[in-house]
Amino acid sequence: MIYKVLSDRLAGREKGSTVEADELHGVNIDALIKGGHLAEQKTKAAKAEKEED
Amino acid sequence: MPYMNNDLAVTVNSVDVSSWLTSGEWTEQFAELETTAMGDSRRTMIAGLGSGSISLELHQSFATSETYQSLDNLKGTVVTVTFTPVGSDAVAADNPKKSVDVLVTELPFVSGSVGDLSTISVTWPMTGPVTTATA
């Protein structure tokens, strides 16, 4: 899973950059999404899979 | 060397809360296990289990990605907190960065009297080991 950084509050991450789940080990990702700091970014593979459905 | 405490950098669950922070404290202690025995003229001790807590005072804000939205979903969970004494300087031996997991046991929603700036104060117990980075 890849996430887009939505805020300028994430330590060591720039707003607008992307981060992979592996890089967020030990971080409560769900809380960051609910807090408006991250958003799930759809990958091309996921989009293609959805179109096939 | 003495320094003015106005650049403490604190992250909670990787969110930089420094610009909302008005006060921060990191405290560690060890239980005292008394080993005094007959024949001793002074009490003797050894260290027992270590523990600690962090305390923060923060401006309360309900705006997008600010205090409330960043912390509310952490209640009852264990998250990593970091403290760096001088946030604008590189982490080094003379500016160590400490990290620890804490249990978010409390989170005031609103606190204050009429006319006050709205702030919240929290104290969360440490759980597990403390790590210190010097580079």
Image: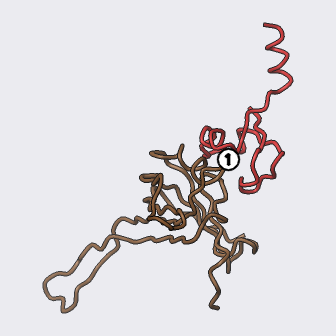
Chain colours: A red, B brown
Q: Position of residue B108 (x, y in %)?
A: 45, 54
Q: Position of residue B72 (x, y in %)?
A: 53, 46
> Of all residues shown, which one is farthest toward the front?
B114
Give the left or right position of residue B121, taking residue A12 as reference.
left
Q: Position of residue B3 (x, y in %)?
A: 64, 87
Front-most of residues B116 and B99: B116
Chain letter for the residue marked with disc 1 in the picture: B
Residue located at (60% from left, 47% from top): B69
Front-most of residues B115 and B38: B115
Q: Quick one: quadrant of the C terminus of chain A?
A: top right
Q: Secondary structure at mark 1?
A: loop
> Of all residues shown, which one is farthest toward the top?
A53
Q: Quick one: quadrant of the N terminus of chain A?
A: top right
Residue A42, picture quadrant? top right
Q: Is residue B106 above or below residue B40?
A: above
Residue B94, picture quadrant? bottom right
Front-most of residues B44 and B85: B85
Q: Is residue B103 above or below residue B21?
A: above
Q: How many marks?
A: 1
> Of all residues shown, which one is farthest toward the left?
B38
Q: Residues within 10 Å of mark 1 (few under 14, many from 20)?
A: few
Task: Give, as a three-letter code, the residue at label 1.
Answer: Thr
Q: Position of residue B34 (x, y in %)?
A: 24, 76
Q: From the image, tell me which residue sits under label 1.
A: B64
Give the left or right position of residue B31, taking residue B111 as reference.
left
